[in-house]
Image (tube, helix red, strand yellow):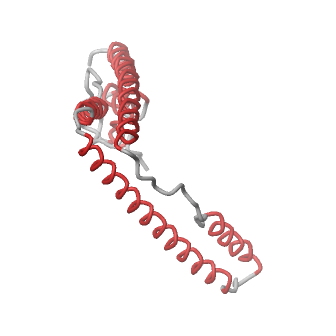
Amino acid sequence: MPTGYTACIEDGCTFNEFIMGCARGFGALVNMRDDAQDAEIPDEVKPGTYHPECIEKAEARLARVQKLTTGELETESLASYEQQVQQEATYQAEQEKHRELYAAMLTQVKAWEPPTKAHIRLKEFMAEQIEMSVPGVYHTNPPVLLSAEQWLASETSRLQDSLKYNRTEYDKEVVRCLERTQWIKHLRTSLTEE
């Protein structure tokens, strides 16, 4: 039975078509592995827009935050605090729901009578899987309402970290794209004209 890569052979593909189709499963073109087999392989791999967009947003937010008045900073701090309180409540509720679901399933597993001795290990395995999946009870630090100055310092630090991270990752992506483009060029050069 042909694979997604070899099906074209049965349709009479050329060596160049076959090798370029197989190349989709490798590092330089791995992002194309789920694309249609007739999707054009680019001559150049270009960086995505994710990191530049994050940089742009963080720079704009940092510029805006640094212009806020004390009253506006207090409002932002309060909104951030209320959001953290809500997120914590939601998180704890979800964890409790998950613990209840796992407990209910474990009860059913323990009540189940394996049909043969050969099924006993299956029952043990199911119980083990559930027991190691049950979320623990985590006590996080409760949210703290920060002063205007504390909130500004925290938000500035967070945004600067985001800028540093996204600039570094974008630089790495540019290098990866150049390497992938070279890989494609070398592959194309190695192929004979049909």
Residue at image point 29% right, 26% down: 47
Judge by depth and name the residue closer to the eye, 157 or 71.
71
Say above or below: 84 vs 22: below
How many numbered circles does the render carry?
0
60 left or right of 149? left
75 left or right of 163? left
Judge by depth and name the residue closer to the eye, 165 or 58.
58
Residue at image point 35% right, 43% down: 7
Q: Quadrant of residue 16?
A: top left
Q: Quadrant of residue 132?
A: bottom right
Give the x, y percent position of residue 162.
37, 33
Image quarter where the C terminus lies is top left
Q: Quadrant of residue 61?
A: top left
Judge by depth and name the residue closer to the eye, 9 or 35.
35
Judge by depth and name the residue closer to the eye, 76 or 39.
76
Give the x, y percent position of residue 44.
27, 21
Residue that lies at the very extreme toward the right in this rendered image: 117
Give the x, y percent position of residue 62.
28, 32
Residue at image point 27% right, 41% down: 70
Give the x, y percent position of residue 124.
72, 72
